[in-house]
Image: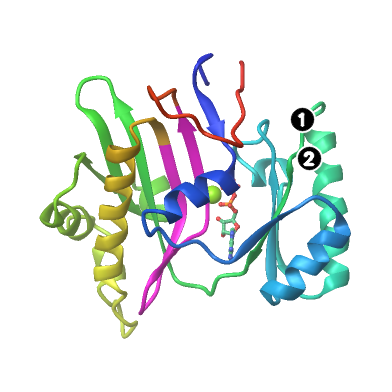
């Protein structure tokens, strides 16, 4: 629940802010009509994923706000209408900023990275393997920010699911250097920006080469001297 001064930063703005710190997200465009959606998908390349962008929607799939695997312009145009109609029905009165059309990322090993502002320790980062590891086994690790290189390496290797990252049953080892680099970039972002109340990157896909963040949820609080364009205030 947001307090009056906290704001949910819309995903396109959050992606842009993180990109300045080298955090990679698939190619994307914010569109406001079925026609624009189809044109954006043509230039991004198929298949694409579509996601609702609304200050009233924090968990997009819960309200029918995500479509994956759209393979042609017709499907994308129809997908735009479907997402907007569904979200309007499920969240009556939601203001809708548009739909994000994203390049569909290849399959990979999924991890999650979170940041919360702990009242005792300050900004704290969480890392875990995605799926059952984090959600069912609660196999996650925490460190206080800022992270040093060795902290980033440890937070990854101490997880019980580490075997999945380091090459299990003939599967290739994923790009652990890129993952360490991502954790350090997130640490820099949080420490330097100074307005992060909560950040969730879920999922992040890790490949044999490189990583991609597929979902960003950022809650910001006012930072003295920083004015941010394009964000929105949410009162609860
Ligand atoms: P939510 O707000 O529901 O968490 P996400 O942005 O995480 O929304 O999207 C839901 C799911 O859709 C993700 O967990 C992932 O499996 C898939 N997904 C999202 N974006 C992409 C993408 N660019 N490429 C491939 N799959 C994606
Ligand atoms: Mg998500």
What kind of element bears circle 2? helix
Q: Looking at the image, in which quadrant does ligand 1 appear?
A: bottom right
Q: Which of 191/121 is in front?
A: 191
Magenta region, residue range:
199-220
Check mark 1 vs ligand 1: CB closer than 8 Å? yes or no: no
The answer, for residue 69, to whether it is visible in the render is: yes
Q: Is residue 136 visible?
A: no
* Residue 26, percent from left and from top: 54, 65
User: Residue 174 is drawn in which quadrant?
Assistant: bottom left
Q: In the drawing, what numbered circle is on residue 159? A: none
Label 2: which residue? 87
State the quadrant of the C terminus: top right
Q: Is residue 27 left or right of residue 152?
A: right
Furthest toward the left, the residue is: 150
Where residue 36 sits in the image (x, y, percent)? 82, 60
Horizontal side of residue 205 vs 38, given as left or right: left
Place of residue 167 in the rendered image (x, y in percent of width and height, measured from the top left): 28, 77
Characterize the local packing of mark 1: few (<14), some (14-19) or many (20 or more) Cα atoms within 10 angstroms: some
Name the residue nearer the viewer: 231 or 91.
231
Q: Is residue 212 magenta?
A: yes
Against 231, residue 156 (above or below) is: below
- Disc 1 target residue: 94
- Pointers 2 and 1 in contact (CB under 8 A)? yes
* Cα–Cα span, label 2 and label 1: 8 Å
């Amino acid at each position: 629940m947001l307090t009056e001064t906290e704001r949910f930063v819309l995903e396109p703005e959050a992606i842009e802010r993180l990109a300045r710190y080298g955090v990679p997200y698939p190619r994307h465009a914010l569109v406001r009509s079925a026609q624009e959606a189809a044109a954006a998908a043509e230039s991004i390349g198929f298949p694409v994923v579509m996601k609702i962008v609304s200050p009233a929607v924090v968990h997009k799939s819960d309200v029918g706000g995500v479509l994956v695997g759209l393979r042609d312009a017709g499907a994308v145009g129809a997908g735009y209408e479907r997402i907007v109609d569904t979200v309007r029905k499920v969240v009556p009165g939601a203001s809708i900023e548009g739909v994000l059309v994203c390049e569909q990322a290849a399959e990979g090993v999924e991890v999650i990275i979170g940041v919360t502002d702990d009242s005792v320790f300050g900004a704290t980062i969480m890392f875990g393997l995605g799926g059952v590891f984090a959600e069912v086994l609660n196999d996650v690790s925490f460190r206080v920010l800022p992270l040093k290189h060795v902290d980033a390496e440890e937070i990854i290797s101490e997880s019980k699911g580490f075997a999945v990252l380091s090459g299990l049953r003939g599967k290739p080892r994923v790009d652990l250097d890129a993952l360490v680099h991502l954790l350090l970039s997130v640490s820099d972002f949080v420490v330097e920006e100074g307005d992060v109340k909560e950040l969730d990157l879920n999922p992040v896909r890790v490949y044999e080469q490189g990583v991609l963040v597929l979902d960003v949820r950022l809650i910001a609080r006012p930072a003295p001297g920083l004015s941010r364009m394009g964000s929105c205030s949410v009162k609860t």
